[in-house]
Image: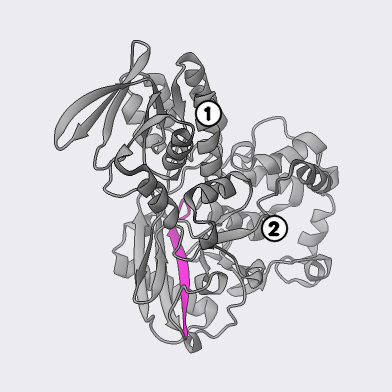
Amino acid sequence: MKIAIIGGGISGLSTAHFLRKGGADVTVFEKNGVPGGTIGSRVSDGYLVESGPNSTSETNFVIDELLADLSISEEKVYADEDSKYRFIVRNGKLHALPSGLGSFVSTKLWTIGGKLRLLGEPFAGRAEHEESIADFVTRRLGSEFLDYAINPFVAGVYAGNPSELSVRAAFPKLYALEDKYGGLLKGTFKGMRERKKRGTQSKASAKLFSFRSGMGILPATISAELGGAIRYATPVESVKRDGAGFAVGFSSNGRSETEVFEKVVLSSPAYVSAGIVKSWLPELASELAKIKYPPVAVVVLGYRREQVGIDLKGFGFLVPEVEKRKILGTIWSSSIFPKRAPGGFVELTTFVGGSRQPRLVVLESDDITKIAHEENSLLMKIDGSPAFRAVSKWERAIPQYNIGHLSIIDAVRHVESLHKGFYICSNFKDGISVADCIANGKKTADAILS
């Protein structure tokens, strides 16, 4: 089988790897000069800088299969045990998320009224329409839990707005607790037993990991394995049905060319995919164009350990929107994984922008760095200027699974069913995490090979 894969991010690369493993002839078209999409790692002045995802979780067995295939299993490093401690900002101070009943009762993160409101969760009714995550959480858990738990969590995962994100699309497992079991508490306990039988884990309990040299080793190793099968600096302009196959139009060395493949996998972002299929599938293109990608800036700062006035024992902190700050949150990178900073120094990774404050990403990198430094200094009692700074800006970062997203995915699946041999495998479909993308790449490859 001669198969074209459009997009050299982790979704496309994973699909290509598993297809080649099954004996297929693959060609990956990548518009940039390097693979990986938003995933990228580099070492600068002794700091390991991640331009995008800093880690992922062992939520499925496909990850282990891929790492074994690539012979990089030994490069994997798990998050430090102390990273289980996570913090939320309230009234300008960091409050640890409760880890048990005792800490839940004593925490000042929520008021007594907010805690008592949770007791009514088992008695909340069901919604009769598609809800946002904000509506869902307010109905079942109350507004205070939304403000000081779910809102910052959504900012950390999607850089998104809980009033816009669909609970069914963005958090299907959370929605399933109500849909299948009738409530969150009841569903949590029953779900744990079912996951144990299936051999899977929830994202909340799955182990967090990265690699000694950073997440960039994944696309780098897969692309090295694929070798000449990847065509860099070769943007695809169109895909159309051509007899029993598909004509892929692309630009190479300034010239427009066309090549026919038996099957095509579209692994580019939704807004890119929309342009590629517009002349062939205008209705699908219109649906894909609806998916929003807010901008995000990733700011990596280094400090001498003694400059930071708090104990960096933990994963980091997230900022609720009601706190009116200019950052989404900060992870304590050098506390989570080893060798992220030189000896005697710490590395912090701060996220700016998202759906909450997209205009901040338009600022110059020096101005964004200043914002991150000033906010961190207030919240973490930092004295003095950073010893290291680096900024990665993404004008379109993370696809938003907003209200109506499931209708878009229905349109995608309908087109796939009509045009056998045409597949879409990208992080706007079936999960945004690195682990999700790898699992979906394997799923797509299996579907093609079968």
Q: Earlier in the sequence, mark 2 or mark 1?
A: 2
Q: Is residue 93 inside the magenta stretch?
A: no
Image x and y of residue 106, in percent: 79, 72
| Count of numbered labels shown in the rendering | 2
Q: Residue 163: which quarter of the image?
A: top right
Residue 175 in percent (x, y) is at: 70, 40
Residue 402 locus on image (x, y percent): 53, 39
At a point 63% along the width and 46% down the height, the residue shown is 60
Colour logic: one colour
In magenta, the rendered stretch is 344-356
* Res. 430 in view: yes
- Judging by the rendered image, the residue that carries numbered circle 1 is 409
Q: Amino acid at mark 2?
A: Glu
Viewed as shown, does residue 235 lie left or right of 112?
left
Mark 2 burial class by Cα count in 10 Å: few <14, some 14-19, many 20+: many
Residue under numbered circle 2? 144
Nearer to me, 98 or 67? 67
The residue positioned 39% from the left and 57% from the top of the image is 40
Left or right, residue 230 beside residue 217: left
Tell me the distance, in whole angstroms, between the alpha carbons under discs 2 and 1.
32 Å
Relative to 4, say whether 262 is above or below: above
Quadrant of the image for the C terminus? Answer: top right
Instruction: Name the foreground residue: 58 vs 393.
Output: 58
Q: Looking at the picture, tell me which residue is in the foreground, 355 or 324.
A: 355
- In this rendering, position of residue 248 left or right of residue 417: left
SS state under label 1: helix
